[in-house]
Amino acid sequence: MQPSDIRAVVDHYSEASENTRLSSPAGQLEFQRTMVLLRQFLPPPPATILDVGGASGVYSLPLAAEGYTVHLIDPVPKHVQQAKAASAEAQHPLASAEVGDARKLSQESNSAEAVLLMGPLYHLTREDDRIAALTESFRVLKPGGVLFAVAISRFASTLDGLSRNLLADPLFVSIVKDDLKTGQHKNPTDNPNYFTDAFFHLPAELSMEATRAGFLIEGLEGIEGPGWLLSDLTDWMSDSKRHDQLMSLLEQLSSHESLVGASAHMMLIGRKRIINPVSLPLQTCELRNLQLEDAASLVENANDKEIASRLRDGFPHPYTMDDAHWWIAHANAQEPATHFAIAVDGQAVGGIGLLLQQDVARKSAEIGYWLGRKYWGRGIVTEAVEAFTNYAFEEFDLNRVYALAFEGNAASARVLEKAGFQYEGLLRKAVFKHGQLLDQLAYAKIRS
């Protein structure tokens, strides 16, 4: 978020009131359904919660009243002042309230059991800013901690326009067209009913962004479902019997994939996986789990056409930060973990991993590896392959680890031979790479 974007958010909320919005029938529905979902997935009190983008404390204060230790962070000074004032009057006050940025939190790593991200993902209109906010949430969560990330549906303005006859305004029609096309909601008017500049997600986009930040997806829920579109919602909310019926129906509908986007707001529930750390310190390097902080080093070393030419097409070139983030998330989502960094002086400069085979081949696995060019010729890969193969035999109860080297990749063949692999044969014209059919050299090591 650029300084101008922050000013736009501050300006919007200098006029708009989150408390007033949530006091309307649709707002009450949103609030009540959000609290249902929070209570369903939150750990018990007194767990520590970071309410990032927590506004004036509309969720922080009720959760504090339930015994949670809640820290509120918001970029709008007015909101933080309101939260502090309300907290001072509350029987169960907030642990803290501060002006802050979702992309750069002041809290320590691994310090919270839960993070509420219920605003930043639509106010951050650039994808890299949203990934940064999600990555920060991942950092501050303890292993096993839970993320509640809220987004506005791509279809919200269209459905709102239909239900409230806003489509009679040609300017709103133009806004809706852009929303549906790109998700970029731009309000060129001074009409606060048309909201402020924001990003509206497709359900799959929200899941993809959270996955890229390293989260395991436990749920994706439509908060209000289609209930917010009821023309007589006031009657539904004020009649206890109809209210209970509506809440029960929405609970049943909320996670149906085909209906999530019909809700004005969507909530993703993500989990920071508990990773059993792996570290194999060797003479030339260390084999360890991939970390979010490895992304820049991966790009620096993997973005090499020569390296990509020796590997399968799934290894991209150019190799971007998006590729690095995706790979780190993918590797850390594997259970059991099978892909690791080759680290030199703490920096991830290569990778090594296994493809576990199935069915009658379940006692076998294929090994693969790569190393940044400036680290070639130091014996790093040979030591890594030998150590990782021994680790694989023990950890995965394997009998055979094999590798397939492309024709012309003499360096990889030498690595395998030095690491104790035996040449088993030639697979003629077995791969198609860069427009050419190539042979593959098959090597294997049998458990002794």
Image: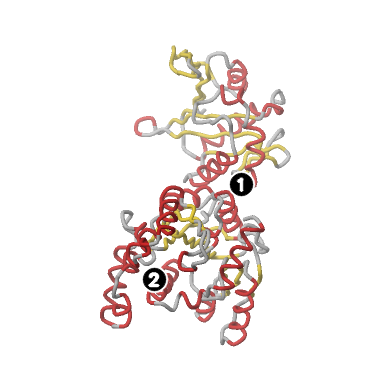
Residue 351 in sight: yes
Q: In the rendered view, does 30 fall on the left or right side of 98?
A: left
In whole angstroms, how far apart are the C-alphas of marks 2 and 1? 35 Å
Residue 228, compared with residue 392, is above or below; it is below
In percent of width and height, residue 277 lies at 59, 48
Q: Residues within 10 Å of mark 1 (few under 14, many from 20)?
A: some
Give the image quarter of residue 83. bottom right
Give the image quarter of residue 304. top right
In this rendering, the count of numbered labels is 2
Residue at (58%, 58%) from the top-left corner?
Answer: 137
Residue 16, compared with residue 270, is above or below; it is below
Image quarter in which the N terminus is found: bottom right
Q: Nearer the viewer, residue 380 or 259?
A: 259
Q: Which residue is mark 1?
A: 291
User: In the rendered structure, are the residues bearing label 2 and label 1 in contact, judged by CB atoms less than 8 Å apart?
Assistant: no
What is the secondary structure assignment of the residue under circle 2?
helix
What is the secondary structure assignment of the residue under circle 1?
loop
Q: Amino acid at mark 2?
A: Arg
Residue 219 in sight: no
Q: Which residue is mark 2?
A: 33
In percent of width and height, residue 293 lies at 64, 47
Q: Nearer the viewer, residue 402 or 440?
A: 440
Residue at (58%, 60%) from the top-left corner?
Answer: 141
Q: In the rendered view, does 284 fall on the left or right side of 32?
A: right
In percent of width and height, residue 319 lies at 59, 34
Q: In the rendered view, does 292 fall on the left or right side of 179?
A: right
Q: Amino acid at mark 1?
A: Gln
